[in-house]
Image (cartoon, grey):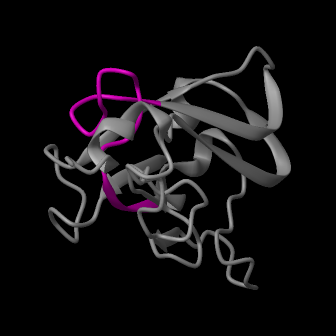
Amino acid sequence: MVKSITVNLTEPVKANDETASIFTLYRSAIDPLATEQNTVHLRLRTDEPLTSTLTFDFEGTMTEANGSLVNGFYNLNIDSTKAAVVGDLDGLMSPDHGDSLNVTGSLSNKLFRLAGDSNGDGMVNKWISPRSDPRMEWATRSST
């Protein structure tokens, strides 16, 4: 299950709903651009008024009943045009301040969810062989 995402910033920002609005997480398999149908609603989880660590819980149609993301690769966008509420955001850490940051989900950056992938390598590997599970002993007995 993937039920939250944490973003670490180099400087503290105001932790409020306006700050949360500059972050967009969306499932890229549906559409390469964020739409209402593939966007994950991010709910900021913090008690601190000023923080450099933002943790978001997931809500909406791209989540399962338990709050986990549905299977797929996700893209994260931090929109610098909305960043006036938090100060000088520079997503690319370049001399030209005010760059947005776009992260495309991949196996290397782990911005995906795959049910059954127990170690985060992008492969389903949480399968129990009937021979290794004593509850399945009846399936491996010969009928002689």
Location of residue 47 with respect to 69 vertically, above or below: above
Q: Depth check: give the residue in front, 48 or 138.
A: 138
Please tell me how many numbered marks the rendered image carries: 0
Location of residue 78 with respect to 91 vertically, above or below: above
The residue lying at 68 percent from left, 68 percent from top is: 90
**In the rendered image, which quarter is residue 136 located in?**
top left
Is residue 41 at least partly visible in the picture?
no
Is residue 77 at least partly visible in the picture?
yes
Residue extending furthest toward the front = 144
Q: Is residue 30 magenta?
A: no
Q: Position of residue 96 (x, y in %)?
A: 68, 82
Residue extending furthest toward the bottom = 95
Q: Which residues are magenta?
A: 58-76
> From the viewer's perspective, is 129 left or right of 57?
left
The residue lying at 40 percent from left, 26 percent from top is: 67
Q: Position of residue 47 (x, y in %)?
A: 76, 14
Q: Position of residue 140 (x, y in %)?
A: 33, 49
> From the viewer's perspective, is 26 left or right of 68?
left
**In the rendered image, which quarter is residue 101 located in?**
bottom right
The residue lying at 69 percent from left, 73 percent from top is: 97
